[in-house]
Image (cartoon, grey):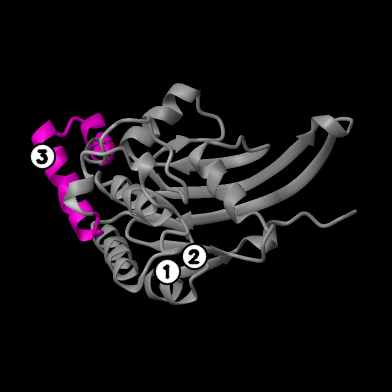
């Protein structure tokens, strides 16, 4: 479901004379349906950079990033947007939504976008918000008014409301209490059971050990200084 081969990434520092910094080269991994691969490595190794390249937020300098048959490294923006709508979900650490939209609609939106009837989409959203212990009294409010932990749980619910065939998870259990942590791990297990291919960053070693089938050390892809 996810195939990465020979991927490189550079950054051009415009405010420093256009200097080019090589941050990754020769990156490669594959993720099968129903498998969770954890990205590991020290801070700055490129875990988040690789995740953003898979999602298409960063453009790869070289190589192939194929998700569901689409090479994200070469695809047109419209094709990447369609991939995100139907196939590739991303649970980031930060909730970015349109202000003033009720939480129930924020969570239901990914399901609505793939044609799920409104009543069913909102039922799915309500079930996830309940599992993640977001009080029903908050569902009509914008999540932009919520605490950080509540926003994180809304983001998780939004990421799991549609059964994406591929999922990217960036610290999904960070800052969660024990009960909500267990709920998130159960959601990941359920996604794997239905065949989702998952790439995740888990600094929580216990969570990583529970859900990850393999670990890939991104530090292996750090360019060696000449």
Mark 1: secondary structure: loop
- Can you tell which quarter of the image residue 173 is in? bottom left
Q: Residue at x 43, y 26 (%)?
A: 79
Q: Position of residue 67 (x, y in %)?
A: 43, 42
Bin the neighbour count of mark 1 within 10 Å (Cα to Cα): few under 14, some 14-19, many 20 and up. Answer: many
Helix, strand or loop for the magenta stretch, by majority: helix
Q: Under tag 3, what secondary structure?
A: helix
Mark seen at residue 202: 2
Location of mark 3 (residue): 120
Q: Which residue in the protein does label 1 denote?
A: 212
N-terminal of the pair, mark 1 or mark 2, is 2
- What residue lies at 38% left-to-right and 69% top-to-bottom? 211
Asked whether disc 1 touches disc 2, contact meaning CB atoms under 8 Å apart, the reply is yes
Q: Residues within 10 Å of mark 3 (few under 14, many from 20)?
A: few
Q: Is residue 78 above or below residue 182?
A: above
Alpha carbon distance from label 3 to label 1: 31 Å
13 shown above or below 48:
above
- Magenta-tinted stretch: 106-134
* Of labels 1 and 2, the one closer to you: 2
Return the x and y of residue 36 as percentages of the image width and height.
Answer: 40, 62
- Establish if 196 lies above or below 175: above
76 or 175: nearer the eye? Answer: 175
Q: Is residue 130 magenta?
A: yes
């Amino acid at each position: 479901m996810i195939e990465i081969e020979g991927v490189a990434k550079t950054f051009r520092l415009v405010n420093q004379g256009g200097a080019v910094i090589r941050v990754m080269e020769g990156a490669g991994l594959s993720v099968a349906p129903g498998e969770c691969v954890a990205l590991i490595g020290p801070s700055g190794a490129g875990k988040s950079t690789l995740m953003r390249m898979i999602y298409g937020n960063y453009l790869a300098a070289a190589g192939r990033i194929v998700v569901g048959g689409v090479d994200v490294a070469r695809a047109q923006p419209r094709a990447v947007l369609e991939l995100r709508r139907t196939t590739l979900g991303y649970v980031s650490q930060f909730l970015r939504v349109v202000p003033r939209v009720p939480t129930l609609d924020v969570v239901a939106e990914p399901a609505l976008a793939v044609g799920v009837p409104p009543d069913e989409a909102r039922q799915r959203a309500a079930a996830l918000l309940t599992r993640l212990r977001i009080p029903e009294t908050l569902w009509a409010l914008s999540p932009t008014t919520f605490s950080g932990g509540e926003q994180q749980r809304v983001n998780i619910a939004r990421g799991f409301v549609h059964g994406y065939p591929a999922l990217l998870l960036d610290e999904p259990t960070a800052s969660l209490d024990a009960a909500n942590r267990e709920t998130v791990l159960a959601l990941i297990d359920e996604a794997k059971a239905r065949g989702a291919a998952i790439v995740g960053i888990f600094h929580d070693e216990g969570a990583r050990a529970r859900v990850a089938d393999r670990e890939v050390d991104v530090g292996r892809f750090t360019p060696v200084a000449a």
